[in-house]
Image (spheres, grey):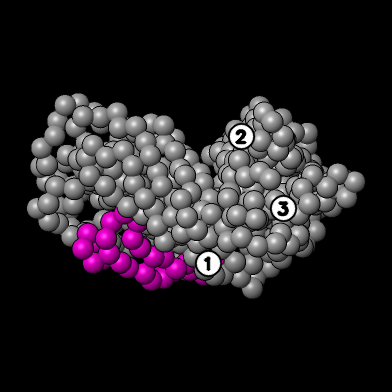
Amino acid sequence: MLHRRVPATLLLSFLSAVLPAQGATVNVSVGGAGLVFNPGEVHIHPGDMVTWTNAGGFHNVKADDGSFGNTAAADAWTFSQTFTALGTVGYHCEIHGGPSSGMFGTVIVEDAGGGGGGQPGTLRFGLASFTVGEATGTATIVVQRINGDDGAVSVQYSATAGTATAGQDFTPVSGTLSWGDKDSSDKPFTVTIANDTTAEPSETVLLTLSNPTGGASLDAARKRSTLTIQDDDSGGGGGGPIKAPSNLQATAVSTSEIDLTWTDNSTNETGFQIERRAIGGVFEGVATVGPNTTSAPVPGLDAGSLSVFRVRATGAGGTVSPYSAEAAAATLADPGPCVSGDNVLCVNNNRFRVAVAWSTGGAGAGQGSVVPLPSAPDSGLFYFFAPSNIEMLIKVLNACVPPFNHYWVFFAATTNVEFGVVVTDTQNGKTRVYYNPLNRSAPPVQDVDAFATCP
């Protein structure tokens, strides 16, 4: 019997037609520093696999349509799913999110054949924070393209004032960085730093990436960064490391001002930096005060607005202490009737208004949604991610009888996201705030001193 040799090129063509191609694998980190999937959006081809790895916390992965998922757990689990059909697939963590809300992500499966599809990648700052000496003159900031290099992409950047003063400590800058197809090299931009002879604390510049193009996404954890300018001038002091302030308290004194007090634990500080943010926002410097100071006003706020504060001490040569614990308060509100709505709960004969702001520490943030309880008008429910996932029961009780003579606020929350509850007495504008930091299981609250505003 005769045997004919099959050409190698023909054999390879036959095998490529019969055997499926080995798809690529894209990795997604779950949780860790925040309640996010990172990157939150990935672009793949049919046959590619996405592998999720839990970086910390009690999480899972669940397709929005229920087609795949795993069981929530706190250990270092991995879960993989291969995608064969074109389209957009949403998913979420059932504990901390829902479809397109809270802790969620997206897989976009694109045609592999030309047209600029594929994996455009994720854009991020090279470091979570940058540091530069004041005398250096310029700071080089690096932006990276990871998890893909298909197609041309771009992103806008900016450097704006944090605690540093624009035009005095640094020169603000903004612009656009661009990558070509198959280009995954780091792209730098520079921030000009001003040198002076004044001893002052280290100061910060806020770095931001925005408006990616070409299908690229932004890394949720590194689309913002901080540049710290370290002072190199002598300012005296000494006496060892600077200790963090403690016992930070925030108290509303008017519709536009909150006053802060703290304990000074150092003897060698040159002053204190005060920073503020909203729930889910980024801290920004709002004031500096001198050494041996234990209080400061923060004016210029909106009526009934919730703020989170922190304070740190500054020392000679640009040294700084760790930050204090955070404290939250809301300015007094303008008196007026309580008007119920999707995000406003009115209780106790509509005298008290309750609102909740929440954040997962990443892209997820918003206002709590109200579930009224008509049969229990002193109480109500809130959810953050989905109506089937109730996060909080809260009630305001009339205890205006001796010996109590107060309105009480009780609530229980089954969540570990960051949130702030603002309860307002609409007759006089008094506010009471209850703050839970990110990744702490919220403790129950039984505040029997909430409002001394009887009757």
> Which residue range is magenta in the image?
150-178
Q: Position of residue 2 (x, y in %)?
A: 84, 48
Tell me: 418 left or right of 315. Answer: right
Identified by mark 1, the residue type is Pro
Q: Residues within 10 Å of mark 1 (few under 14, many from 20)?
A: some
Label 2 CA crowd tier, 10 Å (few <14, some 14–19, many 20+): few
Q: Amino acid at mark 3?
A: Arg
Q: Tag 2's secondary structure?
A: strand
Quarter location, residue 261: top left
Secondary structure found at label 3:
loop
Residue at numbered disc 1: 212
Mark 3, mark 1: which one is toward the viewer?
3
Q: Quadrant of the C terminus?
A: top right
Q: Is residue 75 magenta?
A: no
Judging by the rendered image, the residue that carries numbered circle 3 is 351
Say if the magenta span includes residue 160: yes
Assess whether mark 1 and mark 3 are in contact (beta carbons under 8 angstroms): no
Which residue is rendered at x = 49% and y = 65% of the image? Answer: 210
